Amino acid sequence: MSDNGYVYILMNPSMQNLVKIGKTVREPEERAKELSSTTGVPTPFVVVYDCYFQSCSEAENFVHTFLENKGFRVSSNREFFEIPMKDAIDSVMKAKEYFGEFQKIDSENLEDFEENFDDDYDPDIDNQEIIEAVTKADSYYHGFGDEIQDYNEALKYYLKAIKLGSIESYNTVANIYMNGEGVKKDEQKALNYFKEGSKKGDNSCYWQMAIIFENMENIENARKSWKKYFNSTEEPNEYIAVFYLKFALVNGDGIEYLDKMKNVKQEVISAFKEGGIMAQIHKDDNFYSVGEDFIEFLEENI
């Protein structure tokens, strides 16, 4: 999951000499309204300053540690600080200097770009132009070489690559929206790109569609997506195989497609034996570890 978000500074007239410094992946103003309606304070919180980071959790931890070391923290398990506002803002700016600039995509500009990116479509494009567009997109996306990481520019070039005929770029754009990488997380938009990618022949889109449908609690469509994936794939990797097995366990399905997992049998069994996050079963807001009987089932049937 993406950790792109804000570190914000809030003040409240009813809380003299105290400021709240926290993080949010939403807009800071939304967080301020939420706190104002739930904390019971007579006056609303106001956003004084905010900064957008690639990892708001890391940035928040940096700021909190920095201020705690200076003795400004009221309590080690709370986000309130008794501190002059200038020092609070300076601490967030120090985090900005330490972690570097991170640009949030202007969603309105991006929507305009998405709506119009195929206006000048040329059917006589050769593969070299596709390669150049994807290479440029990858450079911005990962910050390769001397290129400054910029999700806005990366997304524009991936969309250009789609226009030019890059099938795999549907998958990349879908994942950007699914994970909220520099854009507002949007599972429906991700699903739309996965659907288009699958129609163009990228069968790997099906298993990712299955995960989104499961998140949307559309279990029947998730089942159909898993079926389409396994019917079009000979050898899933262990990562995808574990995701499917977890889906089947949680939803009480008969476990199918084990014949497709022979090449990754040991990796799949090891994942469940080790009980790491990949093998955790999440159901009814709780996490479970699979029993020995299920591991024995995999050992006997894959």
Image (cartoon, grey):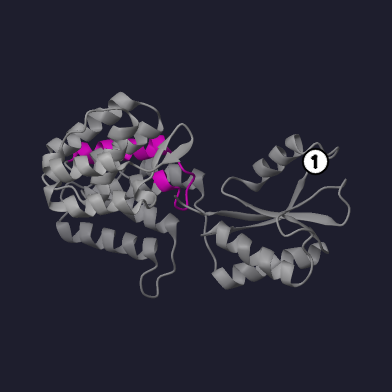
Residue 61 placement (x, y as % from top left): 62, 63
Q: Quadrant of the C terminus?
A: top left
Q: Viewer-proximal residue, 25 or 289? A: 289
Left or right, 206 with respect to 215, comes to: left
Residue with the mark numbered 1: 44
Q: Which residues are magenta?
A: 177-200
Residue 92 placement (x, y as % from top left): 67, 64
Residue placed at 26% from the left, 29% from the top? 223
Residue placed at 41% from the left, 58% from the top? 153
SS for callout 1: loop
Q: Amino acid at mark 1?
A: Pro
Judged by its main secondary structure, the magenta piece is helix
Residue placed at 34% from the left, 32% from the top? 250
Q: Residue furthest top?
A: 220
Asked if the stretch drawn in magenta spans residue 44, the answer is no
Asked if the stretch drawn in magenta spans residue 186, the answer is yes
- Does the rendering let one see residue 202? no
**Crowd class of label 1 (few under 14; some 14 to 19; many from 20; radius 10 Å):** some
Residue 40 placement (x, y as % from top left): 80, 36
